[in-house]
Image (cartoon, rainbow, N blue to C red):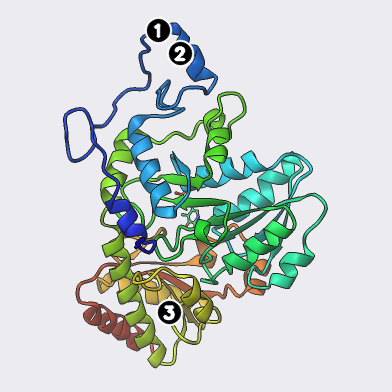
Protein backbone atom coordinates (compact mmCIF):
# COMPACT_ATOMS: atom_id res chain seq x y z
CA UNK A 1 0.00 0.00 0.00
CA UNK A 2 1.19 3.49 -0.81
CA UNK A 3 2.01 5.57 2.28
CA UNK A 4 -0.20 8.63 2.72
CA UNK A 5 1.57 11.92 1.98
CA UNK A 6 3.48 13.24 4.97
CA UNK A 7 5.89 16.17 4.60
CA UNK A 8 8.17 15.05 7.44
CA UNK A 9 8.49 11.55 6.00
CA UNK A 10 9.32 13.11 2.65
CA UNK A 11 12.20 14.99 4.26
CA UNK A 12 13.34 11.94 6.18
CA UNK A 13 13.48 9.92 2.97
CA UNK A 14 15.85 12.36 1.28
CA UNK A 15 19.30 10.80 1.49
CA UNK A 16 22.24 12.81 0.23
CA UNK A 17 25.45 10.90 -0.37
CA UNK A 18 28.46 13.07 -0.96
CA UNK A 19 31.95 12.11 -2.04
CA UNK A 20 33.28 11.27 1.42
CA UNK A 21 30.12 9.87 2.92
CA UNK A 22 29.53 12.64 5.45
CA UNK A 23 26.03 12.34 6.93
CA UNK A 24 25.64 16.05 6.26
CA UNK A 25 26.46 16.76 2.63
CA UNK A 26 29.76 18.59 2.13
CA UNK A 27 29.42 22.34 1.64
CA UNK A 28 30.46 23.41 -1.82
CA UNK A 29 32.56 26.44 -1.10
CA UNK A 30 32.92 27.55 -4.70
CA UNK A 31 31.39 30.23 -6.83
CA UNK A 32 32.57 28.71 -10.10
CA UNK A 33 33.04 25.16 -11.42
CA UNK A 34 35.49 23.53 -13.79
CA UNK A 35 34.49 21.73 -16.98
CA UNK A 36 36.40 18.88 -18.54
CA UNK A 37 35.77 20.26 -22.00
CA UNK A 38 34.56 23.51 -23.57
CA UNK A 39 31.62 21.87 -25.36
CA UNK A 40 30.00 20.87 -22.07
CA UNK A 41 30.44 24.43 -20.84
CA UNK A 42 28.54 25.89 -23.79
CA UNK A 43 25.84 23.22 -23.54
CA UNK A 44 25.40 24.06 -19.86
CA UNK A 45 24.91 27.74 -20.70
CA UNK A 46 22.16 26.69 -23.07
CA UNK A 47 20.53 24.78 -20.22
CA UNK A 48 20.99 21.42 -21.96
CA UNK A 49 22.99 19.64 -19.29
CA UNK A 50 21.30 18.16 -16.26
CA UNK A 51 23.39 18.05 -13.08
CA UNK A 52 26.25 20.25 -14.31
CA UNK A 53 27.20 23.20 -12.17
CA UNK A 54 28.29 26.38 -13.84
CA UNK A 55 28.34 29.29 -11.46
CA UNK A 56 26.84 29.61 -7.98
CA UNK A 57 24.40 32.40 -8.80
CA UNK A 58 22.86 29.86 -11.14
CA UNK A 59 23.12 26.66 -9.08
CA UNK A 60 25.32 25.39 -6.30
CA UNK A 61 25.29 21.78 -5.02
CA UNK A 62 24.63 22.86 -1.41
CA UNK A 63 21.68 24.97 -2.53
CA UNK A 64 20.46 22.08 -4.65
CA UNK A 65 20.36 19.73 -1.65
CA UNK A 66 18.21 22.22 0.24
CA UNK A 67 16.02 23.02 -2.78
CA UNK A 68 15.39 19.34 -3.54
CA UNK A 69 14.45 18.67 0.07
CA UNK A 70 12.00 21.60 0.08
CA UNK A 71 10.47 20.43 -3.20
CA UNK A 72 10.00 17.06 -1.67
CA UNK A 73 8.37 18.56 1.44
CA UNK A 74 5.97 20.66 -0.67
CA UNK A 75 5.42 17.85 -3.17
CA UNK A 76 6.47 19.94 -6.16
CA UNK A 77 8.70 18.83 -9.02
CA UNK A 78 11.40 21.35 -8.26
CA UNK A 79 12.49 24.28 -6.09
CA UNK A 80 14.96 27.14 -5.96
CA UNK A 81 16.40 28.80 -2.85
CA UNK A 82 16.92 32.54 -2.49
CA UNK A 83 18.67 34.91 -0.13
CA UNK A 84 15.37 36.12 1.38
CA UNK A 85 11.66 35.44 1.42
CA UNK A 86 11.09 38.76 -0.37
CA UNK A 87 13.45 37.63 -3.15
CA UNK A 88 11.40 34.45 -3.57
CA UNK A 89 8.19 36.50 -3.80
CA UNK A 90 9.45 39.29 -6.06
CA UNK A 91 11.34 37.01 -8.46
CA UNK A 92 8.35 34.69 -8.81
CA UNK A 93 5.88 37.51 -9.45
CA UNK A 94 8.19 39.17 -11.96
CA UNK A 95 8.73 35.85 -13.71
CA UNK A 96 4.96 35.40 -14.13
CA UNK A 97 3.94 38.94 -15.04
CA UNK A 98 4.78 41.53 -17.66
CA UNK A 99 3.73 45.15 -18.23
CA UNK A 100 -0.03 45.38 -18.65
CA UNK A 101 -0.79 42.39 -16.41
CA UNK A 102 -3.07 42.44 -13.39
CA UNK A 103 -2.80 40.60 -10.06
CA UNK A 104 -5.50 39.81 -7.51
CA UNK A 105 -4.07 39.64 -4.01
CA UNK A 106 -5.19 39.24 -0.46
CA UNK A 107 -5.13 42.65 1.22
CA UNK A 108 -3.70 41.01 4.31
CA UNK A 109 -0.25 39.87 3.32
CA UNK A 110 3.18 40.41 4.76
CA UNK A 111 3.84 44.19 4.77
CA UNK A 112 6.81 43.90 2.39
CA UNK A 113 4.70 41.99 -0.12
CA UNK A 114 1.92 44.59 0.18
CA UNK A 115 4.43 47.39 -0.42
CA UNK A 116 5.96 45.61 -3.43
CA UNK A 117 2.56 45.09 -5.02
CA UNK A 118 1.35 48.59 -4.25
CA UNK A 119 4.46 50.72 -4.74
CA UNK A 120 6.91 48.91 -7.02
CA UNK A 121 4.83 46.99 -9.57
CA UNK A 122 2.81 50.01 -10.79
CA UNK A 123 6.11 51.53 -11.97
CA UNK A 124 6.26 48.64 -14.45
CA UNK A 125 2.57 48.95 -15.32
CA UNK A 126 1.53 45.86 -13.37
CA UNK A 127 -1.56 46.55 -11.31
CA UNK A 128 -2.88 44.78 -8.22
CA UNK A 129 -6.40 44.61 -6.79
CA UNK A 130 -6.49 44.01 -3.05
CA UNK A 131 -9.37 41.85 -1.85
CA UNK A 132 -10.56 40.00 1.23
CA UNK A 133 -9.24 36.61 0.13
CA UNK A 134 -11.83 34.72 2.19
CA UNK A 135 -14.55 36.33 0.04
CA UNK A 136 -14.39 34.13 -3.06
CA UNK A 137 -17.07 36.19 -4.83
CA UNK A 138 -14.92 39.29 -4.61
CA UNK A 139 -11.96 37.32 -5.98
CA UNK A 140 -14.10 36.23 -8.96
CA UNK A 141 -15.54 39.65 -9.59
CA UNK A 142 -12.06 41.20 -9.61
CA UNK A 143 -10.92 39.07 -12.54
CA UNK A 144 -10.23 41.07 -15.69
CA UNK A 145 -9.15 40.29 -19.22
CA UNK A 146 -5.53 40.95 -18.26
CA UNK A 147 -5.48 39.16 -14.87
CA UNK A 148 -2.53 36.80 -14.65
CA UNK A 149 -2.14 35.78 -11.04
CA UNK A 150 -3.99 35.24 -7.77
CA UNK A 151 -1.66 35.81 -4.82
CA UNK A 152 -2.31 34.83 -1.22
CA UNK A 153 -0.81 33.49 1.99
CA UNK A 154 -2.06 30.13 3.28
CA UNK A 155 -2.48 31.68 6.73
CA UNK A 156 -2.35 35.44 6.28
CA UNK A 157 -0.07 37.84 8.08
CA UNK A 158 -1.10 39.30 10.48
CA UNK A 159 -4.86 38.61 10.55
CA UNK A 160 -4.46 34.81 10.51
CA UNK A 161 -7.18 34.33 7.92
CA UNK A 162 -7.00 30.93 6.24
CA UNK A 163 -7.09 30.87 2.42
CA UNK A 164 -9.32 28.31 0.74
CA UNK A 165 -6.57 27.12 -1.57
CA UNK A 166 -8.61 24.44 -3.39
CA UNK A 167 -11.37 26.92 -4.26
CA UNK A 168 -8.90 29.62 -5.27
CA UNK A 169 -7.14 27.06 -7.44
CA UNK A 170 -10.44 26.11 -9.10
CA UNK A 171 -11.11 29.80 -9.85
CA UNK A 172 -7.58 30.17 -11.21
CA UNK A 173 -7.93 27.10 -13.47
CA UNK A 174 -11.32 28.18 -14.85
CA UNK A 175 -9.89 31.55 -15.79
CA UNK A 176 -6.47 30.46 -16.94
CA UNK A 177 -4.67 32.23 -14.07
CA UNK A 178 -1.81 31.14 -11.85
CA UNK A 179 -2.20 30.70 -8.10
CA UNK A 180 0.78 31.65 -5.95
CA UNK A 181 0.74 30.91 -2.21
CA UNK A 182 3.11 32.13 0.51
CA UNK A 183 3.25 29.22 2.98
CA UNK A 184 5.61 30.86 5.51
CA UNK A 185 3.16 30.65 8.45
CA UNK A 186 2.21 27.01 7.93
CA UNK A 187 5.01 24.77 6.66
CA UNK A 188 4.03 21.08 6.94
CA UNK A 189 0.58 22.07 8.22
CA UNK A 190 -0.62 23.03 4.76
CA UNK A 191 0.72 21.70 1.45
CA UNK A 192 -0.54 24.33 -1.02
CA UNK A 193 0.73 22.60 -4.17
CA UNK A 194 -1.25 19.48 -3.29
CA UNK A 195 -4.34 21.69 -3.05
CA UNK A 196 -3.72 23.20 -6.48
CA UNK A 197 -1.29 26.10 -6.01
CA UNK A 198 1.03 26.55 -8.99
CA UNK A 199 3.82 28.29 -7.07
CA UNK A 200 4.57 28.02 -3.35
CA UNK A 201 6.94 30.54 -1.77
CA UNK A 202 8.53 30.59 1.67
CA UNK A 203 10.49 32.85 3.89
CA UNK A 204 12.92 30.25 5.27
CA UNK A 205 13.90 32.88 7.83
CA UNK A 206 10.89 31.93 9.94
CA UNK A 207 9.72 28.45 11.04
CA UNK A 208 11.72 26.45 8.50
CA UNK A 209 15.11 27.61 9.75
CA UNK A 210 13.72 28.43 13.18
CA UNK A 211 16.86 29.99 14.64
CA UNK A 212 16.66 33.63 13.55
CA UNK A 213 20.32 33.46 12.55
CA UNK A 214 19.81 34.17 8.85
CA UNK A 215 17.46 35.44 6.15
CA UNK A 216 16.52 33.11 3.28
CA UNK A 217 13.68 32.08 0.99
CA UNK A 218 12.44 29.42 -1.39
CA UNK A 219 10.26 28.93 -4.46
CA UNK A 220 8.65 25.52 -5.02
CA UNK A 221 6.95 24.80 -8.34
CA UNK A 222 7.07 22.79 -11.55
CA UNK A 223 10.37 21.93 -13.17
CA UNK A 224 9.40 24.24 -16.04
CA UNK A 225 8.88 27.24 -13.77
CA UNK A 226 12.13 26.67 -11.86
CA UNK A 227 14.03 26.21 -15.14
CA UNK A 228 12.52 29.47 -16.38
CA UNK A 229 13.52 31.29 -13.18
CA UNK A 230 17.10 30.11 -13.53
CA UNK A 231 17.36 30.69 -17.27
CA UNK A 232 20.54 32.64 -18.07
CA UNK A 233 18.73 34.85 -20.60
CA UNK A 234 15.47 35.78 -18.94
CA UNK A 235 15.21 34.10 -15.55
CA UNK A 236 14.47 36.60 -12.78
CA UNK A 237 16.18 34.53 -10.08
CA UNK A 238 19.28 34.23 -12.25
CA UNK A 239 19.37 37.84 -13.43
CA UNK A 240 18.19 39.74 -10.35
CA UNK A 241 20.71 37.61 -8.49
CA UNK A 242 19.32 36.89 -4.99
CA UNK A 243 21.51 33.83 -4.47
CA UNK A 244 21.66 32.11 -1.08
CA UNK A 245 25.11 31.51 0.36
CA UNK A 246 25.89 27.75 0.37
CA UNK A 247 27.16 27.93 3.96
CA UNK A 248 23.71 29.13 4.98
CA UNK A 249 21.81 26.65 2.88
CA UNK A 250 23.70 23.81 4.52
CA UNK A 251 22.78 25.06 8.00
CA UNK A 252 19.13 25.57 6.99
CA UNK A 253 19.03 22.01 5.64
CA UNK A 254 20.09 20.66 9.04
CA UNK A 255 17.38 22.71 10.76
CA UNK A 256 14.77 21.53 8.26
CA UNK A 257 15.17 18.02 9.62
CA UNK A 258 13.73 19.04 13.01
CA UNK A 259 10.90 21.16 11.57
CA UNK A 260 8.18 18.58 12.22
CA UNK A 261 9.01 18.35 15.93
CA UNK A 262 9.12 22.12 16.25
CA UNK A 263 5.85 22.70 14.39
CA UNK A 264 4.09 20.28 16.72
CA UNK A 265 5.44 22.01 19.81
CA UNK A 266 4.73 25.54 18.49
CA UNK A 267 1.18 24.43 17.70
CA UNK A 268 0.58 22.71 21.02
CA UNK A 269 1.89 25.71 22.98
CA UNK A 270 -0.06 28.23 20.89
CA UNK A 271 -3.31 26.28 21.24
CA UNK A 272 -2.83 26.14 25.00
CA UNK A 273 -2.06 29.89 25.23
CA UNK A 274 -4.99 30.78 22.95
CA UNK A 275 -7.42 28.68 24.98
CA UNK A 276 -6.26 30.09 28.32
CA UNK A 277 -6.20 33.72 27.17
CA UNK A 278 -9.63 33.33 25.62
CA UNK A 279 -11.02 32.06 28.94
CA UNK A 280 -10.04 35.41 30.46
CA UNK A 281 -12.41 37.16 28.08
CA UNK A 282 -9.69 38.58 25.83
CA UNK A 283 -10.11 38.95 22.08
CA UNK A 284 -7.95 36.11 20.76
CA UNK A 285 -7.44 35.07 17.14
CA UNK A 286 -6.08 31.58 16.59
CA UNK A 287 -7.02 29.22 13.75
CA UNK A 288 -7.11 26.31 16.21
CA UNK A 289 -10.00 27.84 18.18
CA UNK A 290 -13.52 26.77 17.21
CA UNK A 291 -14.66 30.37 16.91
CA UNK A 292 -12.06 31.18 14.25
CA UNK A 293 -14.04 31.82 11.04
CA UNK A 294 -11.96 29.38 8.97
CA UNK A 295 -11.35 26.75 11.67
CA UNK A 296 -13.30 24.06 9.81
CA UNK A 297 -11.74 24.98 6.49
CA UNK A 298 -8.26 24.64 7.99
CA UNK A 299 -9.19 21.28 9.48
CA UNK A 300 -10.21 20.05 6.05
CA UNK A 301 -7.02 21.31 4.38
CA UNK A 302 -4.34 20.52 6.92
CA UNK A 303 -1.95 17.59 7.06
CA UNK A 304 -2.41 15.39 10.10
CA UNK A 305 -0.52 15.88 13.39
CA UNK A 306 1.18 19.26 12.92
CA UNK A 307 -1.32 21.38 14.83
CA UNK A 308 -2.64 24.84 13.95
CA UNK A 309 0.63 26.73 13.92
CA UNK A 310 2.54 28.98 16.28
CA UNK A 311 0.96 32.33 15.39
CA UNK A 312 -1.56 33.88 17.73
CA UNK A 313 -3.10 37.33 18.07
CA UNK A 314 -4.44 39.11 21.14
CA UNK A 315 -6.33 42.34 20.51
CA UNK A 316 -6.12 44.81 23.35
CA UNK A 317 -8.28 47.95 23.64
CA UNK A 318 -5.60 50.48 22.66
CA UNK A 319 -2.12 51.02 21.29
CA UNK A 320 -0.99 52.14 24.72
CA UNK A 321 -2.22 48.99 26.46
CA UNK A 322 -0.58 46.84 23.77
CA UNK A 323 2.72 48.67 24.20
CA UNK A 324 2.61 48.40 28.01
CA UNK A 325 1.74 44.71 27.79
CA UNK A 326 4.66 43.98 25.46
CA UNK A 327 7.06 46.03 27.55
CA UNK A 328 6.35 44.17 30.75
CA UNK A 329 6.11 40.75 29.08
CA UNK A 330 9.69 41.26 27.92
CA UNK A 331 10.75 42.31 31.42
CA UNK A 332 9.06 39.25 32.93
CA UNK A 333 10.80 36.94 30.46
CA UNK A 334 7.77 35.80 28.44
CA UNK A 335 9.83 36.41 25.31
CA UNK A 336 11.23 39.20 23.16
CA UNK A 337 9.66 42.31 21.74
CA UNK A 338 10.84 41.63 18.20
CA UNK A 339 9.49 41.16 14.69
CA UNK A 340 9.90 37.87 12.81
CA UNK A 341 8.53 34.51 13.85
CA UNK A 342 9.13 30.80 14.11
CA UNK A 343 11.85 31.27 16.73
CA UNK A 344 12.41 28.96 19.72
CA UNK A 345 11.49 31.77 22.09
CA UNK A 346 8.20 33.64 22.02
CA UNK A 347 8.31 36.87 20.02
CA UNK A 348 5.68 39.60 20.01
CA UNK A 349 5.07 42.86 18.21
CA UNK A 350 2.29 45.26 17.36
CA UNK A 351 1.69 44.48 13.67
CA UNK A 352 0.20 47.84 12.68
CA UNK A 353 3.28 49.63 13.97
CA UNK A 354 5.85 47.16 12.66
CA UNK A 355 5.58 44.39 10.05
CA UNK A 356 2.40 45.88 8.56
CA UNK A 357 3.35 49.55 8.96
CA UNK A 358 3.66 49.67 5.14
CA UNK A 359 -0.13 49.33 5.03
CA UNK A 360 -1.75 52.78 5.40
CA UNK A 361 -3.72 53.19 8.65
CA UNK A 362 -7.12 53.55 7.00
CA UNK A 363 -6.58 50.25 5.15
CA UNK A 364 -5.33 48.66 8.39
CA UNK A 365 -8.55 49.62 10.16
CA UNK A 366 -10.81 48.57 7.28
CA UNK A 367 -9.25 45.09 7.10
CA UNK A 368 -9.54 44.61 10.85
CA UNK A 369 -6.00 45.34 11.95
CA UNK A 370 -6.79 47.16 15.18
CA UNK A 371 -4.58 49.56 17.16
CA UNK A 372 -4.00 47.22 20.09
CA UNK A 373 -3.15 44.21 17.88
CA UNK A 374 -0.42 42.08 19.48
CA UNK A 375 0.92 39.32 17.25
CA UNK A 376 2.67 36.45 19.00
CA UNK A 377 4.94 33.82 17.57
CA UNK A 378 4.72 31.27 20.35
CA UNK A 379 8.01 29.58 21.20
CA UNK A 380 9.03 26.05 22.05
CA UNK A 381 8.62 26.54 25.84
CA UNK A 382 8.74 23.24 27.65
CA UNK A 383 6.50 24.55 30.41
CA UNK A 384 3.85 26.59 28.63
CA UNK A 385 1.65 26.75 31.72
CA UNK A 386 4.33 28.74 33.48
CA UNK A 387 4.68 31.08 30.48
CA UNK A 388 0.92 31.67 30.30
CA UNK A 389 0.87 32.38 34.04
CA UNK A 390 3.48 35.07 33.41
CA UNK A 391 1.33 36.56 30.63
CA UNK A 392 -1.65 36.61 32.97
CA UNK A 393 0.39 38.33 35.68
CA UNK A 394 1.34 41.06 33.17
CA UNK A 395 -2.31 41.52 32.15
CA UNK A 396 -3.37 41.76 35.80
CA UNK A 397 -0.73 44.34 36.56
CA UNK A 398 -2.12 46.50 33.75
CA UNK A 399 -5.73 45.87 34.85
CA UNK A 400 -6.48 44.32 31.47
CA UNK A 401 -8.10 41.29 33.10
C1 LIG B 1 8.92 37.43 6.78
C2 LIG B 1 7.94 37.14 5.74
C3 LIG B 1 8.24 37.36 4.40
C4 LIG B 1 9.54 37.98 3.95
O1 LIG B 1 10.61 37.13 4.18
P1 LIG B 1 12.13 37.63 4.41
O2 LIG B 1 12.85 36.36 4.59
O3 LIG B 1 12.14 38.53 5.60
O4 LIG B 1 12.51 38.35 3.17
C5 LIG B 1 7.29 37.04 3.46
N1 LIG B 1 6.11 36.51 3.80
C6 LIG B 1 5.78 36.29 5.09
C7 LIG B 1 4.45 35.70 5.41
C8 LIG B 1 6.69 36.59 6.09
O5 LIG B 1 6.35 36.39 7.38
Which residue is labeled 2 in the image? 41
Residue 317 visible here: yes
Residue 223 is situated, as x and y percent measured from the top left of the image, at 52, 39
Q: Is mark 2 within 8 Å of ligand 1?
A: no
Q: Are discs 3 and 1 less than 8 Å apart at CB?
A: no
- Label 1, residues with CA under 10 Å away: few <14, some 14-19, many ≥20: few
Mark 3 and mark 1: Cα distance apart in space: 58 Å
Viewer-proximal residue among 393 and 309: 309
Task: Looking at the picture, tell me which residue is in the foreground, 141 or 207.
Answer: 141
The residue that label 3 is drawn on is 288
Give coordinates of residue 346: x percent, y percent: 32, 67
Q: Residue at x 54, y 78 (%)?
A: 294
Q: Secondary structure at mark 1?
A: loop
Q: CA distance from mark 3 to mark 2?
A: 53 Å
* Image: 266 above or below 147: below
Q: Position of residue 401 (x, y in %)?
A: 39, 91
Label 3 SS: loop
Amino acid sequence: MKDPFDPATRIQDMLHFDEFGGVNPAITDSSTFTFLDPETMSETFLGHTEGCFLYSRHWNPSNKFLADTLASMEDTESAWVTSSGMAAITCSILQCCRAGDHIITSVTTYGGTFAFLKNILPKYNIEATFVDITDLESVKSSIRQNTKLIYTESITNPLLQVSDISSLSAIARQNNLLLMVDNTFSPMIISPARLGADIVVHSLTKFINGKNDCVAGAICSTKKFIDDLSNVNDGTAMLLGPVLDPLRSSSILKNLHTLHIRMKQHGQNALYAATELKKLGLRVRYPGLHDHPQHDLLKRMMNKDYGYGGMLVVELPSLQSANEFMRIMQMEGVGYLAVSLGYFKTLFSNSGKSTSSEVPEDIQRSMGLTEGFVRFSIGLDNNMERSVEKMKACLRKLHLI
